[in-house]
Amino acid sequence: MERIPNAFYTKELREEAVKLVTEGGLNIPEAGRRLSIVPSTLRYWVKASREGKLKDVGNKQKPLTEIEKDLARVKRELAQVKMERDFLKKAAAYFAREPQSGTR
């Protein structure tokens, strides 16, 4: 996993990452891999979300510039596209299999 050292995560990215785990059915390590977030950080966000404190996470950090906001948006879109690509790869592999003998 490529991770940016001293990364700054936007509120929106934290919320989307938590949604992947809580509503998307992904486990924490898998969601972390897809979003390039360390599992321990994601685990902390999920715990804070369950306690209702996710909005307080990261309040001590400086405000984001427009470029940083765009980067966060692109990261979210990339994670979504990767999930869709993986699904399509699996579907294509399933339908490309040769039919087994004894079937029509």
Image (tube, rainbow, N blue to C red):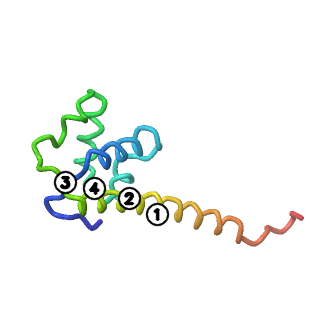
Q: Residue at x 12, y 47 (%)?
A: 61
> Which residue is under mark 1?
82
Left or right: residue 96 compared with residue 15: right
Q: Position of residue 26 (x, y in %)?
A: 44, 47
Quadrant of the image for the N terminus? bottom left
Query: Mark 1 belongs to which amino acid?
Result: Lys
- Type of the residue with mark 4: Ile
Residue kind at label 2, given as amino acid type: Arg
Residue 46 is drawn in which quadrant?
Answer: top left
- Do the residues bearing badges 2 and 1 touch, measured as CB atoms within 8 Å? yes
Residue furthest to the right in view is 104
Question: Which residue is rendered at x = 19% and y = 54% of the image?
Answer: 64
* Residue sitting at x 38%, y 58%: 34
Q: Closer to the camera: disc 4 or disc 3?
A: 3
Name the residue that disc number 3 marks. Answer: 64
Element assignment for label 4: loop
Classed neighbour count for the residue bearing mark 4: other residues with Cα under 10 Å, few (<14), some (14–19), many (≥20): many
Q: Residue 43: image x %, image y %? A: 27, 42
Name the spot of residue 16 as percent of width and height, x first. Answer: 37, 46
State the residue position of label 4: 37
Please say if 37 is above or below 18.
below
Q: How far is the residue under mark 2 from the one under mark 1? A: 8 Å
Lower sequence index among marks 1 and 3: 3
Q: Is residue 2 above or below residue 72?
A: below
| Label 2 sits on residue | 34
Which mark, by number, is residue 103? none
Q: Picture coordinates of residue 89 (x, y %)?
A: 58, 67
Number of numbered markers: 4
Q: Secondary structure at mark 1?
A: helix
